[in-house]
Amino acid sequence: MKIILRSDVDGVGNAGDVVEVANGYAQNFLVPKGLAMRATAGAASQAEAMQRARDLRSLKERETAEELARALETQTIAVLARVGQDDQLYGSVTTSDIAEAIEAQTGVDLDRRNMSLEEPIRKVGSHSVEIRLHSDVRIQLTVEVSPVD
């Protein structure tokens, strides 16, 4: 069945896309939940309008993310942690800890799920964290882990 998506659906498409899905999936899930509508000749113009709005919104979000990337790239975020022998941390520094430190030091609220660590931070020193600000904008941020006095 051909449908027009009203909002983004993982694994199917984005708002305004005309896609082919199984009849049962469309009739029992997508249409009743308001996520999609049947593709008709009149709905095609509505789909084009939704795609134009999505493209415009995505462009604005990307510009905002690029500005934020320029501001954050040059910063080093300091994180304090309890340390034992050989500069080993008790536990590890998580993406939640990093997100809290970024908000406290820069005022920028980032979602921890948009951060990725190659491996957990368990030692004092400088570490690199990749942050996804937009689907097309990624930065490497330096996190300096120091022992608590």
Image: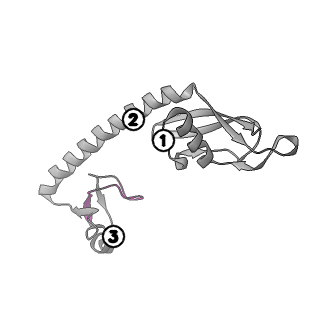
Give the side of residue 6 with respect to residue 108, left or right.
left
Query: Which residue matches tag 2?
Result: 62
Query: Which residue matches tag 1?
Result: 109
Colour scheme: one colour
**Looking at the picture, which amino acid does disc 1 mark?**
Asp
- Picture residue at 21% right of the left edge, 51% below the top: 47
Magenta stretch secondary structure, dominant: loop
Mark 2 vs mark 1: in front: 1
**Looking at the picture, which amino acid does disc 3 mark?**
Ala
- Picture residue at 26% right of the left edge, 62% below the top: 36
Give whichever of 133, 4 is nearer the camera.
Answer: 133
Of the 4 image quadrants, the one containing the C terminus is top right
Q: Would you identify the image quadrant in which residue 127 lies? A: top right
**Looking at the picture, which amino acid does disc 2 mark?**
Arg
- Picture residue at 39% right of the left edge, 33% below the top: 64
Q: Secondary structure at mark 1?
A: loop
Q: Secondary structure at mark 2?
A: helix
Q: Secondary structure at mark 3?
A: loop
Structural distance between the alpha carbons of marks 1 and 3:
40 Å
Q: Which residues are magenta?
A: 2-13
User: Which residue ends up furthest to the right in the rendered image?
Assistant: 85
Structural distance between the alpha carbons of marks 2 and 3:
33 Å
Q: Would you identify the image quadrant in which residue 37 lies? A: bottom left
